[in-house]
């Protein structure tokens, strides 16, 4: 079963988070690839059972590049796939949840089945999707602190995709 993690990233934080999600997906037995939005492999994405999309928070929303990409993504065969979302931010209250909401809303518009695990899987409780806060401004913080949230999210997402679509596809 193929899963894709698609992200925008300028300074590498969201790319790192994407890699942690893919790591968790592989731990659960899935084939997982990460794609920067400028070089997303359309054939791989078309064949994938699930797609997780992530963006840094720019003024508490997705980046302009991600917004543009989302406008076209519906035409990439997203309907019926499992969908998830994630974000990285500079401030604890920097809009990570709003970024996730924007992405999940787009996924619903495409006809995707959105999943985060929510509180149903116990700790760590991830709610709408994982958010990582970097240590640029909040010196007590570090993206690394959120690593487990991303890997566990990837694992749970892959297990749900396998349950829904089987492992062979
Ligand atoms: C134009 C711009 C706007 C930003 N707006 C926010 C914001 O509203 N809230 C926040 O927490 N961080 C904000 N940031 C910081 C980034 O979201 C944060 O550093 C993120 O981890 C960067 O991801 P990247 O390394 O994948 O590019 C902003 C950064 C830029 C360049």
Image (cartoon, rainbow, N blue to C red):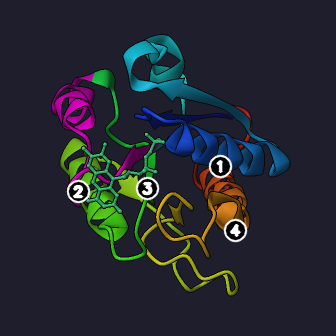
Q: Circles 1 and 3: CB distance less than 8 Å? A: no
Instruction: Compare marks 3 and 2 and give the one earlier in the sequence.
Output: 3
**Magenta-colored stretch includes residue 38:** no
Q: In this rendering, is residue 151 above or below 37?
A: below
Can the viewer see residue 54?
Answer: yes
Q: CA distance from mark 4 to mark 3?
A: 14 Å
Q: Which residue is mark 2?
A: 102
Q: CA distance from mark 3 to mark 2?
A: 11 Å
Label 2 CA crowd tier, 10 Å (few <14, some 14–19, many 20+): some
Instruction: Compare marks 2 and 4 and give the one earlier in the sequence.
Output: 2
**Left or right position of 33 against 42:** right
Q: What secondary structure is marked by label 1?
A: helix
Q: Disc 1 or disc 3, which is closer to the eye?
A: 3
Residue 25 x/y as whole percent? 72, 47
Q: Circles 4 and 1: CB distance less than 8 Å? A: no
Q: Which residue is mark 4?
A: 145
Q: Which residue is mark 3?
A: 87
Q: What is the span of residues highlighted in magenta in the rendered image?
A: 53-75
């Amino acid at each position: 079963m193929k899963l894709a993690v698609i992200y925008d990233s300028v300074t590498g934080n969201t790319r790192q988070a994407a890699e942690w999600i893919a790591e968790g997906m592989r731990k659960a037995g899935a084939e997982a690839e990460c794609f920067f939005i400028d070089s997303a492999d359309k054939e791989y994405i078309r064949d994938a059972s699930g797609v997780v999309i992530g963006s840094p928070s720019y003024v508490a929303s997705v980046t302009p590049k991600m917004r543009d990409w989302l406008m076209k993504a519906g035409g990439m065969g997203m309907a019926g796939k499992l969908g998830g979302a994630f974000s990285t931010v500079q401030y604890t209250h920097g809009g990570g949840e709003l970024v996730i909401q924007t992405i999940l809303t787009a996924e619903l518009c495409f006809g995707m089945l959105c999943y985060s695990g929510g509180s149903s899987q116990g700790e760590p409780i991830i709610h709408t999707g994982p958010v990582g806060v970097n240590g640029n401004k909040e010196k007590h913080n570090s993206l690394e602190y959120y690593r487990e949230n991303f890997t566990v999210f990837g694992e749970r997402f892959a297990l749900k995709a396998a349950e829904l679509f089987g492992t062979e596809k």
